Amino acid sequence: MKPDQSTPSSRPALVAWRWPIVVVVIAVLSLLGFHAACRVVRDGGLAAVSALGDAANFGEGFRTGRITTTFISSLPRIAPDGGTKLELVAIESVETLTRTDDRRIFFDMVPLGATVSEIRVPVTYRYHLRLDDPWQLEVHEQTCIVHAPPIRATLPPAIDTAGLERHSSRGWLRFDSDEQMAELEVNLTELLGRRAADPDSIDLVRETCRRRTAEFVQNWLLAEDHWRADRFRSVTVIFADEAPEDPSAVPPTLILDVAR
């Protein structure tokens, strides 16, 4: 019986096509790998461009030299009389004002006694910054340093006349207590206005005003999407009557809570 010749004849054909098939498979796999690599590079490039865009947006209009202009342009329209104010704090107090008039006659040898007039009245003092006063903002790393205008007392103070109390006493030869009281009442608004604007009174509300001013700037940064961990993380407020040697060394007034 003769051996089957079909099997040996088919094997040489398979052997002949083996390496071309391997080359084709390798080429296909290489092409797929190259396509995947291109996608990774493309996506990574887009992410890098996006990051660079964010960095550019952070710098544009929000760097020293331009941030002040950007801030000022966002403020409300200034009234012709400069009436636009940033109200900061209101303090309620009961004030006592006293006027004493001591008189003598005959070369000050004979005393006529003293007239003492006293008024107690509830008063509300308010303090503000004027938006048309000079403002300056600068950038130090991720801190917005705000050089704010001086704190001003809102005048006249609000006087609660319904709660006003009067008290008078007079010397044995004095009959002008009513006139003295009337004069004290006439000057009441002026006297309380001076008290409100006194530097000691302003110092009492200084830190509260500083905090409120920082919150005002923080709200602006929030609206501009610049109050966040990768941009501005703190606000430092320095008022016009304060002159630190190194503003960047002043402790921040407000710090971003990164835990949120």
Image: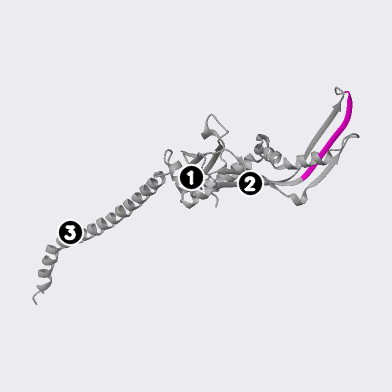
Q: Nearer the viewer, residue 173 or 12?
A: 173
Name the residue carrying label 1.
232
Which three-letter amino acid code belongs to the residue tagged 1?
Phe
Which three-letter amino acid code belongs to the residue tagged 2?
Val
Who's the residue at 48% across and 45% down the image? 232
Along the polypeptide, which appears first: circle 1 or circle 3? 3
Considering every residue shown, the one lying at the far right of the view is 172
Q: Nearer the viewer, residue 218 or 135?
A: 135
Alpha-carbon distance for marks 2 and 1? 26 Å
| Visible residue check, residue 26 | yes
Cβ atoms at labels 2 and 1 below 8 Å apart: no
Considering every residue shown, the one lying at the far bottom of the view is 1
Considering every residue shown, the one lying at the far front of the view is 106
Residue 191 at what x, y percent from top left? 71, 39
Q: Nearer the viewer, mark 2 or mark 3?
A: 2
Question: Which image quadrant for residue 37?
Answer: bottom left
Name the residue carrying label 2.
89
Residue 61 at what x, y percent from top left? 41, 44
Magenta segment range?
109-120
Disc number for residue 124: none
Disc number for residue 23: 3
Q: Does the segment drawn in magenta span residue 116?
A: yes
Q: Does the segment drawn in magenta span residue 37?
A: no
Cβ atoms at labels 2 and 3 below 8 Å apart: no
| Magenta: main secondary structure | strand
Alpha-carbon distance for marks 1 and 3? 57 Å
Residue 228 at what x, y percent from top left? 49, 49
Give the side of residue 182 with respect to residue 6, left or right: right
Indicate the secondary structure of the residue bearing disc 3. helix
